[in-house]
Image (tube, rainbow, N blue to C red):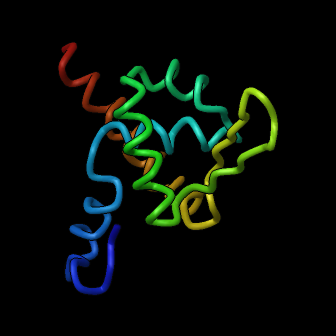
Amino acid sequence: MITRKNMSPCPVGLLLQVIGNKWKVLIIRDLLTGTKRFGMLKKSVGCSQKVLTDNLRMLEEDRLITRKVYAEVPPKVEYALSKTGYSLKPVLDAMATWGEKYKKTLTK
């Protein structure tokens, strides 16, 4: 969890602190299209259950996603981006644009 004590003084450093691994970026990417259940995220992100659980917890602690638990058997849990999490859309869009351009330079 990011606090004032461990927060990077550099804005880019702070961004990397929050979304600094590929799993978090892929989770956010998938939640940009709407609410998802755990199994859907696991399938689309392509990581282990433990890695997904750990990253979902970190994203929730940093207030980028929300978690809604339904009182059902079996339990139903849905994940969605918070307003702050959704504010990362332009960042991910820019990353996607850069990735497409870079991919073209590698195929020349």
Q: Position of residue 76 (x, y in %)?
A: 73, 34
Q: Looking at the rendering, in which quadrant would you find the C terminus?
A: top left
Residue at point 27%, 44% (across, down)? 21
Q: Position of residue 57 (x, y in %)?
A: 45, 51
Q: Quadrant of the N terminus?
A: bottom left
Dividing the picture into quadrants, the one containing residue 51 is top left
Question: Which residue is the extreme one toward the front?
Answer: 73
Left/right placement of residue 101 relative to residue 58 reads: left
As drawn, 62 above or below 68: below
**Residue 2 sits above or below residue 94 on the image:** below
Name the image quarter holding residue 45: top left
Left of 55 or right of it: where is 78? right
| Residue for point 33% across, 72% down | 2
Question: Which of the two residues, 61 or 23, is positioned nearer the viewer here?
Answer: 61
User: What residue is at 66 percent from the left and 32 percent from the top?
Assistant: 37
Residue 91: horizontal and vertical position, in percent? 43, 55
Furthest toward the bottom, the residue is 4
Residue 44 pos. (x, y %): 51, 22
Q: In the depicted view, which residue is nearer to us: 49 or 31? A: 49
Determine the image quadrant of residue 100: top left
Residue at the image point whose x is 25% and y is 78% from the top = 7
